[in-house]
Image (spheres, rainbow, N blue to C red):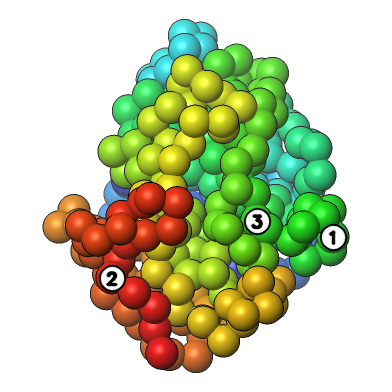
């Protein structure tokens, strides 16, 4: 492995996973490359998951969910450009692919997250290029909902709008039923996604807050350009650290003021 797109950490099992390692024609085919961290001064690679090729991002956990066959197993959900792939990674030297799903409109399956920290049934994912390439006709980003009640038979159940104007959706994270997503020129948007367990079509998802870091394109209804915010992270304190291409980093917190669609605002826009 010469370099990788990024490194994912499985905090439940204290190991790392390199994803998107180059070149793609290496032995592990740029898939999941496990890194044992039992001795941080002497990490080593016990194996990899290569049979679905390039992995752009992943989330790995000790599984606890409705598919009782796999409770207590180390499950990785990989986001592989044109699909999601579910792995049983318990044995790092011999990972087993449990399923692969190409959902409707898949263009660049980018990244996603379980909707609940300790109950693994639904994931939400962002597709980075479906708006850019016109698959989503109005260019307003959508977040996809995947039901993993059966890890061997994942199901796409619906979508919801990630913003209220054109943008490109990117990294999302979920904590306590709240989704924090960076949407490039539309800024950071926060949604209440607790309803998904009962309404997996996304019809009851509610926007809570937003902060627009790239107001230059608002008058035109937004744009499907790679501007604004690429990623964010919400700390236990409630503060959110978000990066931008043009204006550096922002520290945000959901305020009590009213925002679009009746949601709570962060307190305005950048200038």
Q: Residue at x 34, y 74 (%)?
A: 268
Residue at the top extreme, as displayed: 68
Position of 22 relative to 158 (above/below): below
Percent coordinates x, y for residue 223 in the rendering: 69, 74
Q: Residue at x 54, y 69 (%)?
A: 186
| Left/right of residue 163 with respect to residue 11 in the rendered view | right
Labels 1 and 2 touching (C-beta < 8 A) = no
Q: CA distance from mark 1 to mark 3?
A: 11 Å
Q: CA distance from mark 2 to mark 3?
A: 23 Å
| Mark 2 residue crowding within 10 angstroms, few (<14) / some (14–19) / many (20+) | some
User: Could you say which disc has been placed on residue 88 in the image?
Assistant: none
Q: Which residue is mark 3?
A: 141
Q: Which badge, 2 or 3, comes first in the chain's sequence?
A: 3
Quadrant containing the N terminus in the rendered view: bottom right
Q: CA distance from mark 1 to mark 2?
A: 32 Å
> Residue 94 falls in which quadrant of the image?
top right
> Residue 104 falls in which quadrant of the image?
top right
Q: Which residue is mark 1?
A: 134
Q: Which badge, 1 or 3, comes first in the chain's sequence?
A: 1
Labels 2 and 3 touching (C-beta < 8 A) = no
Question: Is residue 14 in sight in this rendering?
Answer: yes
Percent coordinates x, y for residue 20 in the rendering: 65, 62
Front residue of 15 and 219: 219
Position of 162 relative to 213 (above/below): above
Q: Which badge, 1 or 2, comes first in the chain's sequence?
A: 1
| Mark 1 residue crowding within 10 angstroms, few (<14) / some (14–19) / many (20+) | few
Q: Comparing marks 1 and 2, which lies closer to the viewer?
A: 2
Q: Which residue is mark 2?
A: 267
Dot 2: element: loop
Labels 1 and 3 touching (C-beta < 8 A) = no
Q: Residue at x 76, y 36 (%)?
A: 103
Dot 1: element: loop
């Amino acid at each position: 492995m010469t370099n990788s797109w990024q490194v994912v950490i499985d905090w439940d099992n204290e190991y790392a996973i390199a994803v998107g390692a180059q070149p793609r024609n290496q032995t592990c085919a740029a898939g999941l490359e496990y890194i044992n961290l039992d001795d941080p001064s002497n990490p080593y690679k016990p194996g990899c998951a290569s049979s679905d090729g390039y992995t752009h991002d992943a989330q790995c956990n000790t599984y606890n969910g409705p598919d009782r066959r796999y409770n207590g197993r180390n499950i990785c959900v990989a986001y592989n450009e044109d699909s999601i792939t579910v792995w049983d990674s318990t044995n790092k030297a011999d990972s087993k692919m449990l399923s692969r799903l190409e959902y409707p409109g898949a263009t660049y399956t980018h990244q996603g997250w379980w909707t609940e920290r300790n109950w693994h049934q639904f994931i939400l994912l962002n597709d980075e290029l479906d708006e850019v390439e016109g698959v989503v006709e109005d260019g307003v980003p959508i977040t996809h909902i995947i039901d993993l009640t059966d890890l061997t038979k994942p199901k796409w159940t619906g979508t919801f709008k990630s913003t209220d104007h054109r943008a490109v959706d990117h990294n999302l994270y979920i904590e306590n039923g709240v989704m924090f997503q960076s949407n490039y020129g539309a800024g950071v948007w926060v949604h209440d996604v607790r309803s998904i367990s009962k309404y997996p079509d996304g019809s009851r998802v509610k926007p809570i807050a937003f902060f627009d870091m790239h107001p230059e394109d608002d008058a035109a209804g937004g744009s499907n350009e790679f501007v604004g915010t690429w990623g964010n992270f919400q700390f236990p304190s409630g503060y959110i650290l978000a990066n931008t291409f043009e204006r550096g980093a922002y520290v945000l917190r959901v305020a009590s003021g009213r925002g679009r669609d009746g949601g709570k605002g962060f307190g305005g826009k950048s200038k």
